[in-house]
Amino acid sequence: MDADTQLCGLDPDSPYVELAVEVFAMLADATRVRIIMALRNAEELSVNHLADIVDKTPPAVSQHLAKLRMARMVTTRQDGTRVFYRLVDEHGADLVKDAIKQAEHSVSNGSLPRHHHAQVGASA
């Protein structure tokens, strides 16, 4: 079991720690988090569609998408003059989902956060 942990880089002395910090820094922006959330719920979206969803201008969204693309969190497909964006894999979306769940805990005032209610109903 320890071999699996070491292969995945989950030890405290992992060489991936600094890269993980860069991933968190990339997600330390509300617009980028909203973009990831929007792409999580869609197969792919254009810049203009994403701009409508996150309520930002297309040039601003395009700049955020360029950063996410450099971080290899999103990828593109071109169709004529339109560019469509999608998540590279589920990991960025999973990070955002877990961060939202953690945020729900921070404002739940001791009550069970909303994401736990679905789990309780499913296990009953």
Image: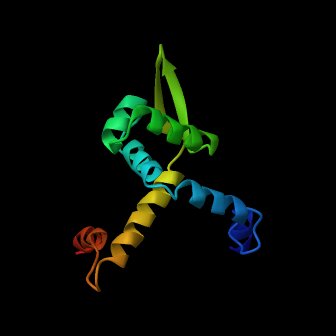
On screen, residue 80 above or below 63: above
Q: Is residue 16 visible?
A: yes
Q: Residue 35: where, in percent of width, then height?
A: 42, 45
In the image, taking residue 124 as reference, residue 67 lies left or right, namely right
Which quadrant holds residue 100? bottom left
Q: How many marks?
A: 0
Q: Residue at x 63, y 41 (%)?
A: 70
Q: Nearer the viewer, residue 51 or 39?
A: 51
Q: Which quadrant of the figure contains the N terminus? A: bottom right
Vertically, is 49 above or below 114?
above
Specify the quadrant that holds the C terminus.
Answer: bottom left
Residue at 69% x, 58% y: name it: 19
Vertical comparison of 14 with 19: above or below: below
Pick the front one: 29 or 78: 29
- Image position of 109 (left or right of 17): left
The residue lying at 59 percent from left, 59 percent from top is: 25
| Residue 31: image location, x then y, percent | 43, 49
Does residue 46 appear anywhere in the picture? no
Q: Residue furthest bottom?
A: 110
Identify which residue is drawn at 26% across, 83% down: 111
In the image, taking residue 46 as reference, residue 91 lies left or right, namely: right
Q: Residue furthest top?
A: 80
Q: Position of residue 16 (x, y in %)?
A: 72, 62
Q: Residue 44: x and y, percent?
A: 42, 33
What colour scheme has been applied to the protein in the rendered image? rainbow
